[in-house]
Structure formats: C-alpha cells, structure tokens
Image: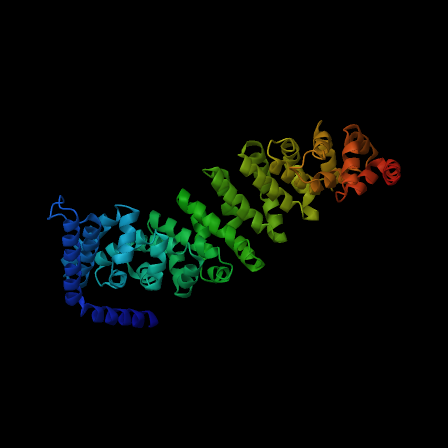
Amino acid sequence: MQSNLDALVTKLDLHLRDLDVVKGGIRQHERALAIAIATSTENPNQNPNEKPQKNHRKEQVWDFFSKLRIGNTEVKKATLEALIQYLREGEKAVLLVGHEGDLPRLIHLLDSSLQVIRERAAHAVSMLAMEDECKKALMAEGAHPPLIRILESGNPHAKEKAALALLELTYFSENAHAVASHGGIPLLAKLCSHGTPAATECAAGTLRNLARNEHIRRLLSEDGAVEALIGLVTCGTSQAQEQAAEALQYLASGKDDRIRTHIARHGGIQSLLVFLKHAPSPKAQGTVICTLSNLATSATNAKALVSSGFVTQLTDLLNTGSSSVQQLAASAICNLSSYIDLKKQVGEAGCIAPLTKMLEAKDSSEQEVAAQALSTLLLVNSNRKEFCKEEKGILRLVQLLDPHNQSIGKRFPMSALLALSGSSTYRKRIMSAGARPHLEKLAEMNVAGAKKTLDKIGGKKLLSIFTRHKSS
C-alpha cells in the first residue's frame, strides 16, 4: 500500500512539473540560441550554422527528456533507446545526463504499465548508476523503490537491469540501508534462484554489498538470503558463485553466532567445500577459505570442517596455491588449531610439512603466518614429533629469531620453540641451530619473551652471567 502511495505522489509531482514544460522549453532554446550567436561573434571564422559542441550536447539531453515528458508511447520507447545509445558514449555523456537531465522523469518511467518502457528506463538508470555522482542523485530522487518493484513484477530483462542498478547503488553503505528497508532483500533472494544468469550475478553482488553492513546481516539471515546464496554457491555461474561466497564471508564475519549456525544448518559448509575444489581462480579460492575460516569461529562448525576434510584441502593449497592463497590457508589452519581438541586432527591431515617449508618463503608475512600456525600445532606431542622429522624445521625457526631480520616478529617463532623445549633432545637441536646468540641479543633488546625462551631451552645460568656482565 505504501509503495503504491509513493508511486502516486511521484506521478502527481511529475504532472505538476510538466505544466512548465512549454515555457521551460522556450527559455532553453532562447538561451542556446543566444550562446550560439555570442560564440559565433567571438569567432568570425566559425560556421554560423554550427553550435558549440558542449551546448549542442546539453540541448540534446534536454530534448531527450522533453520527449520523455510529452511524447506518446512510441516516442518514449524510441527516445529511451536513443538515450541508452547516448549513455554508451562514455563517462562524459553519463555525467551530462546526470547533471542536465530530468532524473525524476526517468525514474517515474520505472513504474510504467508497459514492460518495454520499464525495461529501457531500468537500463538507462543502471548505466547512470555506474558513476558515483549519479548514484547520489538517483538515490536522492528515490530511484530505489521503483527498482525494487521491478524485481517483483518486471519482465526478466527489466529485472536484470534493475538488479544491476541496485548493485551499483549499494556500493555506498547508506544506499544499502535504504534498499534493505524498502523490502529489497526477499526479492533479491528470489532473483538469485529464478533470474537470468546475469540477474543472479547482480542479485548476489547486491546481497554481498548489503552483507558488508553488520546492521543488515540479521535481516539478511531472516529474509531468505542465506539459503539463496548457498544455492548459488552450489549451482550458479562462476561469477555468481564468487559473489555468493563473498556475501557469506561477510555474513559469517560478525559477532552473531546464530548466523554462522544458520549457514551451516542449510548446507553452507558442504557447498563451499565443493566450490573450493573447483574454484576457478586464486581470488575465488581465497574468498572461500576466508568464508570457511569465519564459519570456524563457531566450535561446532570448526569440528564439522575438520571432519569434512577442510584441512586436507588447505594442505593441498599450501603445496600448490599462489602466495596469497597459501597465507590464507595457513591462517585458516591456525584458526582451526586454536581448539585444543582439534590440534591433533589438524596435524594428522599433513599440514605440518608444508607449513615448515613455508618458514623459508621470501615473503616475511608468509613466514610469520606459518610460524603462528606451528606455534599452536606444536602444543601437541604427535605434532612435535612430526615437525622434528623435518630436517631443517628447527633451524628455520631459529633463523627467524635473527635480530637483524626486523621484517618478522619474534613472538611466534619463540612460541614454537618454547613448545619444543620440554624435550632435552629438541633443546639440544635448538641450541645447535644457533638459538642462543639470537635470544641473548633479543633479551638485551628487551624483546618480550626472549628471556623466558632462553631460560626454557637451558640458558638460565648463561643468562644470569650475561645480565651481571651487562650491569657491571
């Protein structure tokens, strides 16, 4: 009822504006003629029949909207098609229409009783929405309610263009609020299941934009978006799958554990694991890893992920993935192994060897995340044994302690070495690898944890001598 009233109010306002169209048209042409005469006086060599390009283009835009105001149906159809062609000329054309055009008139046509008019109007609005300045103008003029109505009652191509417009508009967070508050979520969720391939991609992208806002996430969960997004991850186009996975990533990232549970209950974990196996790009792999890692914030989900083979897939990616994917995989392993009862299972999946190899990566951020993952895995005896089978594992950890290497923090390498310090055999190997001089220097520099680590690996006596020598 409210949306119908809004449409009637808009229509009345437009009719009032149309009362001035003839008078406005005369003024417009008089101004254009005056400018043309003045310009041709300044430049005698200019052909008097040629108007300055800029003013000609403004008059062309004005002409489009004059026809949209007073033309019959066939004229409006032809004019909208001509406007679309004009907008295809690029950014300057789009901005000129945004500044000089009658946007309320164009928006009004989104509610036309003729589907072809609605479709072409939605197409034009979607092109305007790609420019930030026009986004603001369109929202200020109330473009989102009629676009949402098209999602409900438009033809397939109109829905596609309306979804594209909403995708572009919701890149601004304040616009996302407006779309959600006008009932856009259930219709976008429905479009994910019943739209054209292009429409489903745009709908998923719009839901992703909405999910970036933590205040909208609960509403997304309640209005069917989760189920729709999981469905797209399972059987959408590659782009729709990525958009849906990213939307689920945001939904799973907040403090609300009920949303994570909701995603898992509706098959989200299984769908994402299948997509991860066949993800078409490192970007898609990274998105899925982050989504599943966010889901693992829930202990129940973490157990389900480990039992479903997630760590095995992560281990494969540690061996074969790009640098960025390897870092995300190591970080996900670190998150999973933060649960005491999962450390052993995570280690048994074979991730310790590639994590150990990652300690000598060229990128310090890769080294650090590998050390972090190992520092928690090595708290379990079976994982320590597995780690120490690696000939250079301890040496690589010790090398990260080098005070001259300031690109990497010392906290996680020291934590990993502390986890090994309970065995005299491991302590000897740590000392043989050259840990003592590094730790002594770090202790002298008052690096947190250095004195404790040196004490634990058998340097207590030497440390006291070192301290007395320093004070004297």
Q: In which quarter of the image is the N terminus?
A: bottom left
In front here: 35 or 431?
A: 35
Q: Where does the image place residue 394, in percent across and percent down from the top left?
A: 73, 31
Check the image and tell me how it is coloured.
rainbow
> Is 160 positioned to the left or the right of 68 in the image?
right
Q: Quadrant of the C terminus?
A: top right
Q: Is residue 234 visible?
A: no
Residue at 35%, 56% in the rendered image: 135
| Vertical position of residue 290 compared to residue 139: above or below | above
Q: Where does the image place residue 262, in percent across and percent down from the top left?
A: 53, 57
Q: Where does the image place residue 251, in percent across and percent down from the top left?
A: 51, 55
In front here: 371 or 437?
A: 437
Count of number-bearing discs: 0
Q: Where, by quadrant of the figure, is residue 318 drawn?
A: top right
Residue at 22%, 50% in the rendered image: 54
Q: Can residue 189 be seen in this view?
A: yes
| Vertical position of residue 379 compared to residue 359: above or below | below
Q: Where does the image place residue 377, in percent across and percent down from the top left?
A: 69, 41
Q: Where, by quadrant of the figure, is residue 309 drawn?
A: top right
Residue at 66%, 38% in the rendered image: 408
> Is 401 positioned to the left or the right of 99 in the image?
right
